[in-house]
Image (tube, grey):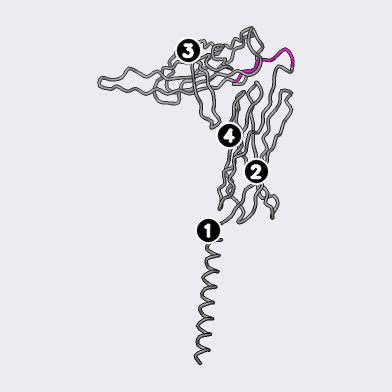
Amino acid sequence: MELTIDRSETVERSVNLENKSGDSARLRVYAMDFSIDKENNFTFSEPGHESYSCASWLNIEEADFELGPGESKRVKVIVSVPQEVEPGGHHAALFFETIPAEAEAGVSVTISSRIASLVYLTVPGVTEADILAEAEIVSLLSPGWVEKGPVEIGVLVRNTGNVHLEIAAKAHLSGSRSGEIGELDMGQTVVLPHSERIMKGKWEKTPFFDKVTANVVVGYFDQQGELVNKSATARFWVIPWRIITAVAASFVLLALLIWRLRRRYRLRVERK
């Protein structure tokens, strides 16, 4: 759920929930803060824990209800932005959690499940300078050399602005002898303000032997809605060392064999 709401403004949105199981389910709805580390691991915490939290701004109209088998329900969420709030991006997770039925006698464990709807909210500033959508490439993740594919290539991206960014990444691959040899789509992801994310992919069709240049490009839209591309380059070798070693060993053995045969021939000639 992506929203742009001014300070002191209140808007209403809804989330459609469907019970696809064959049993009735009792659910509760609540908001929490969340953060995402660079390895794409989520951490959830109580509202107000994260500096860019908007969890306390979400009010659920009906936070506890029952949903029968096959039933669906639109859960209304009222978002109220305070007057005194920093412009830029704010985020929260809206959880829908099942409430387990009372355990039977002799059963000490019950199972509950929950799913989250992520909320990304942008509070406009007084001037354009109050909103900054900007990212940078921190580093590239690539091997120094590999024997063969697949090769994992990655990029570490940092969001240096104050709003969340949806960033896409792609690697353009070329060889020193064969020119352009492929592309690697590393997908797209949301990067929260002042945080980092690793985006990576696996390149399968590597050349047999070559020095490869990977030009990694990341793209996102800035605060004016203009597409921004930034790039960085890494190089690595594809060296099939097992094959090279086997061929070299074969040549050495062949040379030794020829040397022994020639020596035997000389000795035979000298005896005659």
- In the figure, 52 relative to 214: above or below? above
Q: Secondary structure at mark 3?
A: loop
Estimate the x, y position of residue 9 in percent, counting from the top left. 64, 9
Mark 2 vs mark 3: give the one in front: 2
Q: Residue at x 58, y 31 (%)?
A: 197
Left-right relation of 15 to 173: left
Left-right relation of 250 to 171: left
Q: Amino acid at mark 1?
A: Arg
Q: Residue extending furthest bottom?
A: 272
Extent of the magenta region: 120-127
Work out whether mark 3 precedes mark 1 in sequence or the reverse, and give the earlier one. 3
- Density class for disc 1 (Cα within 10 Å; few <14, some 14-19, many ≥20) is few
Work out whether mark 4 precedes mark 3 in sequence or the reverse, and give the earlier one. 3
Mark 4 to mark 1 CA distance (whole Å): 31 Å
Q: Which mark is residue 242?
A: 1
Q: Amino acid at mark 4?
A: Ile
Mark 4 to mark 3 CA distance (whole Å): 36 Å
Q: Is residue 192 magenta?
A: no
Which is nearer the eye, 227 or 215?
215
Estimate the x, y position of residue 248 in percent, counting from the top left. 55, 65
Mark 3 to mark 1 CA distance (whole Å): 63 Å
Left-right relation of 134 to 61: right
Q: Which residue is mark 3?
A: 63
Mark 4 vs mark 3: give the one in front: 4
